[in-house]
Image: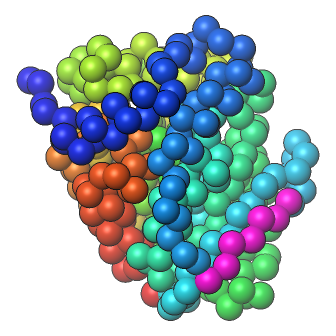
Amino acid sequence: MAIPIDPEIIAARAAQAAHFPAFDVTVLPPAEARARANAAARYFNDGLPEMGGVEDRRIQGPGGLIRLRIYTPIAATARGAIFYLHGGGWCAGDVDTHDRMLRLLAQQSGSVLFGVDYRLSPEQPHPAALDDCLAAWEWIERRARRYALDPARFAFTGDSAGANLALSLAIRLRDAGRTMPAGCALLYGCFAPGLDTESARTFGTGPYGLTAERMAWYWGIYLGPAKDAPPVEATPLYADLVGLPPIFLGVAEADTVADDSRLLLERLEAAAVPAELVVWPGAVHGFLQMTRDVPIARAAIDDIARAIKGWIV
């Protein structure tokens, strides 16, 4: 059944399209596709919320330097912090494309937020991105107390491909017997390829933004040589979920991958993992980056911040 898109989202997308005409990311050279996608995403970043501090660091990762951005709100009250992994289909996005929403999330949660730029596909397929996320987390974990933060009170958070990485990283830490996050906020995540779901059939044909065809392409470039036999580490829907921390699942109602989160919720409940699922009505994939123009995006940030504060204060 068709679902009407929030009119403010429609207006925001139309304004963006006037500046950045549509293009097919699947047929362009990766660097050109990435540059065009990132430029279009940065369109929504005007009117940045004021921060107490924003610091960019370059830290050593397994494949070179990793950019890490540290957002400190004016009123940082939490003992923990947010470790954020951006979306972009594992092939685009960075802390700049998500700058406004990350500032707002830090502000609304009253916590320091660490945003990570990981290696991207297709040049660097799995496990490069996840390895970078682990390296960034280990750097933060070693230095958390320098920032007056408790490393056991962090929330792993991410949108879309970043939600996949946040969950996969928590599972990797659990399997290694390491300290896990206090909770994970997974925002319109994609957790396994090739799912024949109602949301993919209903919203994956084009009018709602992210298509099922393009999502399959994202999975293909992320998995690379492993696409015919995807490892469980890259497809956390099929992983052992027992012993994970509480999970918040944020779902855009009119989203191709909406049912990824619903299927994950079923598996989390079967594994006795505390989980909450919130559906944002009339929302589409990627709407959280529209906080400048879309009231429901700002309300969704409040929902996410509320869940995170329950874990890290």
Residue 55 in magenta stretch = yes
Q: Nearer the viewer, residue 276 or 12?
A: 12
Residue at 27% over, 63% down: 299
Please state, as top left, top right, bottom left or bottom right, where the N terminus lies in the image.
Answer: top left
* Quadrant of the image occupied by residue 81: bottom right
Q: Nearer the viewer, residue 17 or 191?
A: 17
Find the residue positioned furthest to the top.
27
- In the image, 208: left or right of 117? left
* Quadrant of the image occupied by residue 208: top left
The number of discs equals 0
Q: Does any portion of residue 32 appear in the rendered image? A: yes
Residue 164 in magenta stretch = no
Colour pattern of the rendering: rainbow
Q: Is residue 36 above or below residue 26?
A: below
Q: Does any portion of residue 165 appear in the rendered image? A: no
- In the image, 251: left or right of 111? left
Residue at 13% over, 31% down: 3
Please state the horizontal and vertical placement of residue 110, each as a whole percent of the image: 47, 82
Q: Is residue 74 above or below residue 18?
A: below
Please state the horizontal and vertical placement of residue 63, each as a whole percent of the image: 88, 42
Q: Is residue 42 above or below residue 32?
A: below
Residue at 38% over, 71% down: 305
Q: Is residue 95 above or below residue 261?
A: below
Q: Which residues are magenta?
A: 52-58
Q: Nearer the viewer, residue 301 or 192?
A: 301
Please state the horizontal and vertical placement of residue 288, each as a whole percent of the image: 39, 50
Residue at 82% over, 65% down: 57
**Would you say the magenta stretch is mainly helix, strand or loop?**
strand
Find the residue positioned furthest to the front.
18
